Amino acid sequence: MVILGLLLAACTGQLPYNSLDPAGPVAQKQADLYWLVFWIAAGVFVLVEGLLVYAMIRFRRRSADDTPRQIHGNTRLEIMWTILPALLLAGVAVPTVGTIFDLASRPEGDVLEVNVTGHQWWWEVEYPDLGLLTANEIHVPTDRPVALNLTSRDVIHSFSVPRLAGKQDLIPGRTNIIYLEAPEAGMYLGLCKEYCGLSHANMRFRVIAQEPTEFDEWVEAQREEAAVPPSGSLEAEGLEYFSTGQCIGCHTVRGVDAAVGRVGPDLTHLAARDTFAGAIFDLNEENLTRWLEDAPAVKPGAKMPSGLRDMGLTEDQIEAMVAYLLSLE
Ligand code: CUA
């Protein structure tokens, strides 16, 4: 087990999901509590195992007819091993309960509200105060605490971004709130941590923390309506297929009148994202083409139907639609 443990620990030097490498005050408090409990438990382990090994050696049977002194009970010991664990548990409970209440209380300051809705198998991300809707990539500014209001459209999911804020369930018909702060600009990986069906493992997301000015620029760009391709272009042809086909039943593209579906992700600024389909694929021509051709083949159980099989699209139509989607910056 030790050798196996060492081998597995050597698998990677990058640990993007490591909650012991906190990148913000919320995750820091969780890590602090973890280490406190860990060291108390380590102390108990050493003490108990030490006494056990000592007793095994000191009181081992020395000859065939060796019998230990026969006693019945020891009041002092009984009291000691009742009180000591009780004190230890109380010592763990006080900081644990304190941290729970601390993390559940709304942070001071100008809190940014973000509504995150779990879907099989992607994340809808809404900024109610900014009037924005996006998916899978949660942009946050580095200078404001963020309140994530979590719910689900279908089954129970679990939102986990270990380096920033631990995890919390998304439950249909209910809103759970967690707070996070990301003082350092950067990308933090997240994933669904509650088994939620075939593509549970393909339900990723990322939190992108940006300096305030960059975040504001992102907000301004996201507020725009979708880009309209120049007429006669391949992109315009793609828009034609997109807006007259089945896509608009599920997807919104602000600026395209008929495209108001909310079943799938909002695509208004799809090309401004680095990833798609639950943040499992890099957003590029090749991956989008495979996705439009046959989504369930590349992501098991995907609710997006196969373009070739189910929607009767041709390769030429898919090529045009991919060009259109990639123009939605
Ligand atoms: Cu959503 Cu697992």
Image: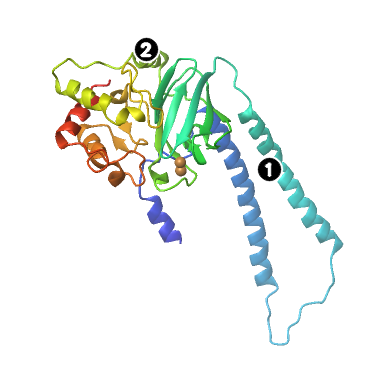
| Residue at the image position 37 percent from the left and 14 percent from the top | 223
Find residue 67 and report its image quarter. Answer: bottom right
Q: Position of residue 244 (x, y in %)?
A: 26, 26
Beta carbon of the mark 2 residue lies under 8 A of ligand 1: no
Q: Which residue is mark 1?
A: 92
Secondary structure at numbered mark 1: helix
Q: Amino acid at mark 1?
A: Val
| Earlier residue among tags 1 and 2 | 1
* Relative to 307, 45 lies left or right: right
Residue 118 in sight in this render:
yes
Task: Tell me residue 133's x, y (percent).
Answer: 41, 22
Query: Is 140 left or right of 49, judged from the image as shown?
Result: left
Q: Residue 66: horizontal and vertical position, in percent?
A: 73, 83
- Work out which residue is located at the far bottom of the displayed protein and give it: 64
- Counting other residues with Cα less than 10 Å from the Cα at mark 1, is it few (<14), some (14-19), or many (20 or more)? some
- Please give the residue where the numbered disc 2 appears in the rendered image: 220
Q: Nearer the viewer, mark 1 or mark 2?
A: 2
Q: Give how far apart the Cα atoms at labels 1 and 2 are.
A: 47 Å
Q: How is the image coloured?
A: rainbow
Which image quadrant for residue 100? Answer: top right
Q: Is residue 30 above or below residue 110?
A: below
Question: Which residue: 49% across, 38% down?
Answer: 154
Is label 2 in a helix, a strand or a loop? helix
- For the residue marked with disc 2, what is the amino acid? Glu
